[in-house]
């Protein structure tokens, strides 16, 4: 065994109780838990700002017909 194997030996040899896995929450319920979580906080705002800046630059350069 390597040093890393020794570090996790208690987990590798653990006797998992498979009965507890049968009492899991349904996927539809679990999804509701993470619904309010936004992984990319501020992404929408940054995207809108970039879009506004690109449109303004295109209008300034007289390329508004490309929109």
Image: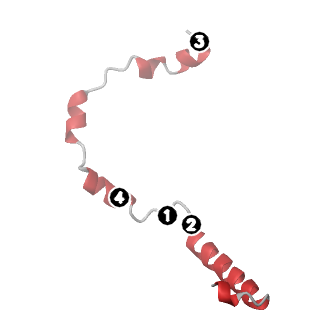
Counting from the top left corner in percent of width and height, residue 23 is at 20, 41
Q: Is 39 left, or right, of 30 in this rendering? A: right
The residue depicted at 33 percent of the width and 56 percent of the height is 31
Inter-mark Cα distance, 4 to 3: 39 Å
Of the pair 39 and 33, the residue shown nearer to us: 39
Residue beneath disc 3:
2
Q: Mark 4 points at which residue?
A: 33
Pointer 4 or 3: first along the chain? 3
| Mark 3 closeness class: few <14, some 14–19, many ≥20 residues within 10 Å | few
Tell me the mark number nearer the camera, choosing from 3 and 1: 1
Q: Check the image and name the residue furthest to the top.
A: 1
**Residue 54, relative to residue 8: is it above or below?**
below
- The CA distance from mark 4 to mark 1 is 12 Å
Looking at the rendered structure, the secondary structure element under dot 2 is: loop
Residue drawn at x 63%, y 73% is 46
In this view, the mark in front (4 or 1): 1
Sequence-first tag of 4 and 1: 4
Tag 1–tag 2 contact (CB < 8 Å): yes
Q: Name the residue under label 2.
A: 41
């Amino acid at each position: 065994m390597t040093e890393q194997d020794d570090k996790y030996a208690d987990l590798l040899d653990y006797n998992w109780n498979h009965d507890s896995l049968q009492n899991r929450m349904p996927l539809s319920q679990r999804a509701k838990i993470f619904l309010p979580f936004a992984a990319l906080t501020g992404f929408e705002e940054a995207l809108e700002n970039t879009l506004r800046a690109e449109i303004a630059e295109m209008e300034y350069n007289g390329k508004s017909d490309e929109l």
